[in-house]
Amino acid sequence: MTKRTTSVAMTSATEKELASLLVRDDGQEDICLATYRPSTGLTRDSALIAEAVPPEAGDRYVNRNATVTAEYILRGVAIAQRKGCGLVFLHSHPGASNWQFMSVPDRDAESSYANLARELTGLPLVGMTLATGTMTWSARHWNIGKGRQVDCTHSSSVRVVGNRFAISWNDVLRPQPQPNRRQLRTVSAWGEQCQADLVRRRVLVVGAGSVGLDVVVRLAASGLCHITVMDFDVVQPHNLDRLIGARPRDARLKRPKTYVAQREGRGAATAEDPKIEVSDLSICEPEGMKLALDHDLVFSCVDRPWPRAVLNALAYTDLIPVIDGGIGIDTFADGRMRNAIWRSHVIRPMRPCMSCNRQLDLAQVIPDRQGIFEDPKYIENADLSVVPASQNVAPLSVSVAAGLFSQYVSFSVAPSGLGDPGPLHYSLNTHNLDHLEHTTLPHCAIEQAIGVGDQRLDLTGRHNKAEQLRQFTRFPDHATRLLRWIDDRNQMLSVWLDRLSK
Ligand SMILES: [Zn+2]
């Protein structure tokens, strides 16, 4: 069984507020409280910071080290309890740098309130430390043991989602990989510190079609240690003109698209021990959604409205940024090309959602969920403007991938201190790149649901097409099974030769 891990996430606005309560002009330590909502993945429990509970006069004493009164803790617990939240106990380590583990007084202070907070809120106390020298966060969940015998699990990361995606890493649980000679050129672009951050992120790529496959290969080549690819579809002959890396035999052997992405990703990977995992779930299924909650960042490489609606919501409810984009190819009535437009955007709090930036028509989600777009009779009779377009060509799908990657690099690396650029729109006929002016709509329900975690409105359900295709790929006929066995042996030989050549 995979060991459960813990993490904490917050928006940059929340981080700013908490830092203003913890960083003092006189350089002394300080304490404050906050509330959080849980976000429960398959193997990771995240605490999403909901709001700060600032101390009032007499709530704490500062004399180099800080202590708090029981009244303040009880007030924090009462607020958390009323809102269905857990309690966070935060303090600062002035001038310290990097991830902080607990001193004996830190441990005594947190453990003395851990049982009370858990009993009254029903959720473990979360402790956090801010090392003010480098503004690095560290965290732990007091989730071990019963009653007064309570102990903590150190979190693996603290994620802050803003203009730039900043992660504080626990170097013991997620050690910094040393860059190797295959990554020298990559490191020279943004430096060792940035590379150490990028390669530790667990990234999910939803959709292993023409764009998703390219995304997996390039992430693996840039040194990422942990990539998951999710798709339930299978390679078919008509995919071969766009699925670069797929071969005719993949279509003959009814290989899942994720199989090709894994094979090509492993071939391109430069990490010492890359983990490229695959899932044949749909993000629209409850288990697929839970798997997504184990990740730090998602690439959305799907064009259907239902999965995109699920990912659109996830970016706000669970503070997992989604890098999304797509292409629309427009033709004249006689079939000649009129134009192609591709877009890219980071979906996250403080940026418009896919519906507000007009990249997702929410009216199409229900017909998609009902499987209507799979029905040939419906497609034949429907006005084409209401059927989601899915055409793409190899020379242009690379532009979509490039759009996603420029958003990813700006959001992660922030060249010259500038983070994600907002929604971008590229028009092929005039070759204009435009910054779209879409902003957050004040009444958008999706963008209001920031950090609600497990209290989210559930958009998942049974996905009939995914269930059918899984039957098809998991249980092939005898001849296909035999050919797959031979192909797998061939594949193992090639992996072995690659290892020897490293
Ligand atoms: Zn919106």
Image (tube, grey):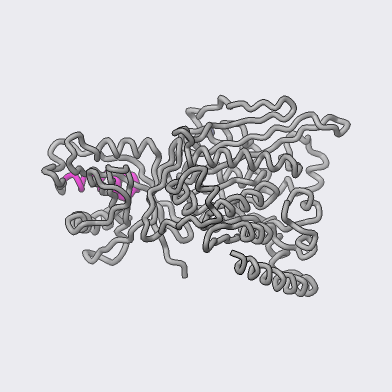
Q: Quadrant of residue 368?
A: top right
Residue 28 point in image, percent of width and height = 17, 41
What type of secondary structure mainly makes up the magenta span? helix
Q: Quadrant of residue 64?
A: top left
Residue 462 point in image, percent of width and height = 62, 55
> Residue 162 vs residue 103: left or right?
right
Q: Is residue 471 above or below residue 130?
A: below
- Which one is nearer the viewer's eye here, 475 or 77? 475
| Residue located 54% across and 41% down the image | 408
Residue 192 point in image, percent of width and height = 45, 48
| Residue located 39% across and 56% down the image | 156
> Residue 244 vs residue 405: left or right?
right
> Residue 103 vs residue 3: left or right?
left
- Which one is nearer the viewer's eye here, 325 or 432? 432
Look at the image and say whether residue 205 sits in the magenta stretch: no
- Which one is nearer the viewer's eye here, 372 or 65? 65
Give, as a single range, the part of the protein colored magenta: 71-88
Image quarter where the C terminus lies is: bottom right
Look at the image and say whether residue 87 sits in the magenta stretch: yes
